[in-house]
Image: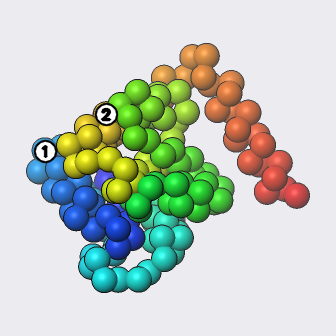
């Protein structure tokens, strides 16, 4: 598995810890799209778009993680792009259901909302979970139908 990760200046430390966890503990290849400095004033929408572009344009990268102060801005931005299904998760149940019930391909979190230990648990659960289909499949399909209709104009 390979995923893209990005953050704004509020989450550089947490992003680095997550990258280390993914590479060392989960043996997952991570492409870091920034930012790498807590003084970097790049706006979170720019970073979200970088991760989105990696998912949409790279056959090897199918998932992404975005971290800002709250996780809200990253989720809002990522979800503006077709084919991207981002969920802001700050609890274990939501992280699991984001993938199992909603088939998300982007996890967003807030570095100013959760601590490092919880963030690692959320990432671990999210990357290990798979879409289960079942009762959720028609709901996810309906979301995709709405998306296609919106794109068609």
- Looking at the image, the residue that sits furthest to the front is 112
The residue where tag 1 is placed is 25
Q: Choose between 146 and 70: the one closer to the eye.
A: 70
The residue depicted at 48 percent of the width and 35 percent of the height is 98
Q: Is residue 93 above or below residue 82?
A: above
Residue 4 makes an appearance in the image? no
In this orientation, which residue lies closer to the viewer: 53 or 95? 95
Percent x, y of residue 131: 48, 29
Tell me which residue sits at (22%, 64%) in the image.
13
Vertical comparison of 141 with 138: above or below: below
Give the secondary structure at mark 2.
Answer: helix
Element assignment for label 1:
loop
**Relative side of 125 to 140, left or right:** left
Quadrant of the drawing holding the C terminus: bottom right
Residue projecting furthest to the right: 153
Instruction: Report crowding for label 2: few under 14, some 14 to 19, many 20 or more residues within 10 A (C-alpha).
Output: some
Q: Position of residue 68 (x, y in %)?
A: 41, 62
Sequence-wise first label, 1 or 2: 1
* Residue ID for mark 2: 125
The quadrant in which residue 64 appears is: bottom left
Residue plotted at (77% across, 48% down):
148
């Amino acid at each position: 598995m390979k995923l893209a990760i990005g953050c704004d200046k509020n989450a550089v430390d947490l992003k680095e810890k997550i990258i280390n966890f993914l590479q060392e503990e989960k043996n997952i290849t991570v492409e870091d799209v920034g930012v790498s400095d807590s003084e970097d004033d790049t706006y979170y929408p720019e970073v979200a778009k970088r991760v989105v572009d990696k998912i949409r344009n790279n056959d090897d990268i199918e998932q992404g993680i975005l971290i800002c102060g709250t996780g809200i801005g990253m989720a809002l931005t990522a979800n503006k792009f077709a084919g991207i299904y981002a969920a802001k998760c700050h609890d274990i149940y939501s992280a699991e259901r984001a993938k199992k019930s909603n088939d998300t391909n982007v996890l967003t979190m807030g570095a100013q909302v959760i601590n490092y230990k919880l963030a690692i648990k959320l990432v671990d659960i999210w990357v290990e979970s798979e879409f289960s289909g079942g009762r959720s499949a028609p709901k996810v399909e309906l979301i995709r139908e709405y998306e296609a209709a919106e794109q068609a104009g």
